[in-house]
Image: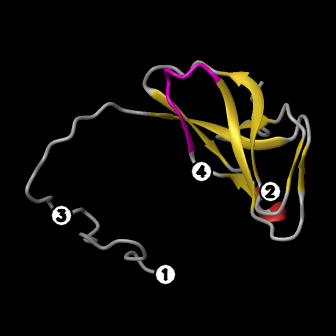
Amino acid sequence: MPARAHAEDAGYDLRSVDETSLAPGGRALIRTGISVAIPEGYAGFVLPRSGLAIRHGVAPVNTPGLIDSGYRGEIMVPLINHDREETFSVETGMRIAQLVLVRAEEISFSEVETLEAGTDGRGEGGFGSSGS
């Protein structure tokens, strides 16, 4: 079962039911052996584990992975080994990612000619526009 390492954690750890090796630059789809019924109005995001990322260069390929509330299949995590030299071994029971559930409000979109200014004054400033 997905579980949080600490009561105040947002993410529920997902564990591998497979054993495999990821060569440098290699990818593999790792099974977790679980399916979930996410309530309507919520979505699940599969996110990396920071320890795997910093210590081994291993992370999900499609971060974040989105699980819609209607999906009932097994959660699988496509991992990639970004390390250029070391092979990474995925072991059965290893924590490979985390699942975070978020509210997904239904909204409607409208086409407009212009947008009103945002409250922070950024306007159309993109990446890096809020400072270094």
Under circle 2, the secondary element is helix
Q: Mark 2 to mark 4: distance in Å?
A: 15 Å
Q: Mark 1 to mark 4: distance in Å?
A: 24 Å
Mark 1 and mark 4 in contact? Answer it, CB < 8 Å: no
110 with respect to 106 (left or right): left
Q: Mark 2 to mark 1: distance in Å?
A: 25 Å
- The residue pinned by badge 2 equals 51
For this rendering, which residue is in front, 8 or 88? 88
- The residue pinned by badge 1 equals 132
Magenta range is 65-73
- Residue located at (73% from left, 48% from top): 79
Q: Earlier in the sequence, mark 3 or mark 1?
A: 3
| Label annotation for residue 117 | 3
| Coordinates of residue 34 in the picture (x, y in percent) | 73, 23
Q: Earlier in the sequence, mark 2 or mark 1?
A: 2
- Residue located at (7% from left, 56% from top): 113
Q: Is residue 119 above or below residue 66?
A: below
Classed neighbour count for the residue bearing mark 3: other residues with Cα under 10 Å, few (<14), some (14–19), many (≥20): few
Q: Is residue 122 above or below residue 66?
A: below
Which amino acid is tagged 4? Thr
| Coordinates of residue 76 in the picture (x, y in percent) | 69, 34
Q: Earlier in the sequence, mark 4 or mark 3?
A: 4
- Residue located at (15% from left, 58% from top): 115
Which amino acid is tagged 2? Gly
